[in-house]
Amino acid sequence: SRHDGGAGPSAAPALPGMAGMAGGQVPGLGDGVDMMANMSPEMMQAGMDMVANMDPAALADMAKMMGMDAGQASKLQDTMANMSKEDLAKWTGRAQTVARWTAKPLALYRKVSSLVPPTYLLAGLVALFALMVYGHQTDSF
């Protein structure tokens, strides 16, 4: 059953690093990586349960803030609601591996972002994404 527990779309989620979203601020790439690297499996499960049980209107509002349309958010919610504990553990492990692998490049990105034009940084991030896709396809991590 879906419910929002009385929390509207502007209520602060109970996950670390997400408090800024309460004011309409969407976390940046670095915030997401830091948050993912520090989440326990229990915290990940709590986040999945929160999204799976969220009121559809609240989810649509949150999705809009993050640049998603309501249809994408609904599909994501259905996927999370039907995910087994084994799949959750597998994807949590993968996400945390990616977060650990990207920690040093992200620190470097933060350091040089004010010195280098964004176009060059984007090219580097595309290369990093390609590496992550390769790792996923070969099940390297």
Image (cartoon, helix red, strand yellow):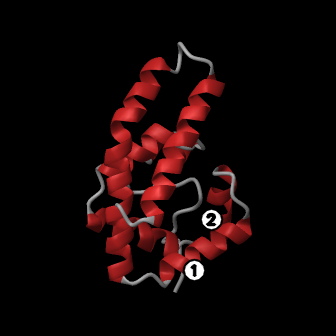
Q: Position of residue 69 (x, y in %)?
A: 73, 62
Foreground pick, 47 / 131: 131
Apparent side of residue 43 relative to residue 59 in the rendered image (left or right)? left
| Residue type highlighted by circle 2 | Ala
User: Label 2, on which residue?
Assistant: 58
Report if the CB atoms under discs 2 and 1 are less than 8 Å apart.
Answer: no
Report the residue at 44% width, 40% height from top. Answer: 31
Do we see residue 38 in this rendering?
yes
**Mark 2 secondary-structure assignment:** helix
Q: Secondary structure at mark 1?
A: helix
> Where 79 sits versus 18, above or below?
below
Residue at the spot 51% in from the left edge and 57% down from the top edge: 133
Residue wearing tag 1? 78
Label 2 – label 1 distance at C-alpha: 15 Å
Instruction: Identify whether 44 is placed above or below 122.
Output: below
Q: Residue furthest top?
A: 115
Q: Position of residue 51 (x, y in %)?
A: 50, 69
Does label 2 or label 1 sit earlier along the sequence? 2
> x, y percentage for residue 106?
42, 34
Of residue 112 and residue 141, the one placed in the foreground of this image is 141
Q: Quadrant of residue 45?
A: bottom left
The picture quadrant where one finds residue 108 is top left
Report if residue 12 is visible in the image. Answer: no
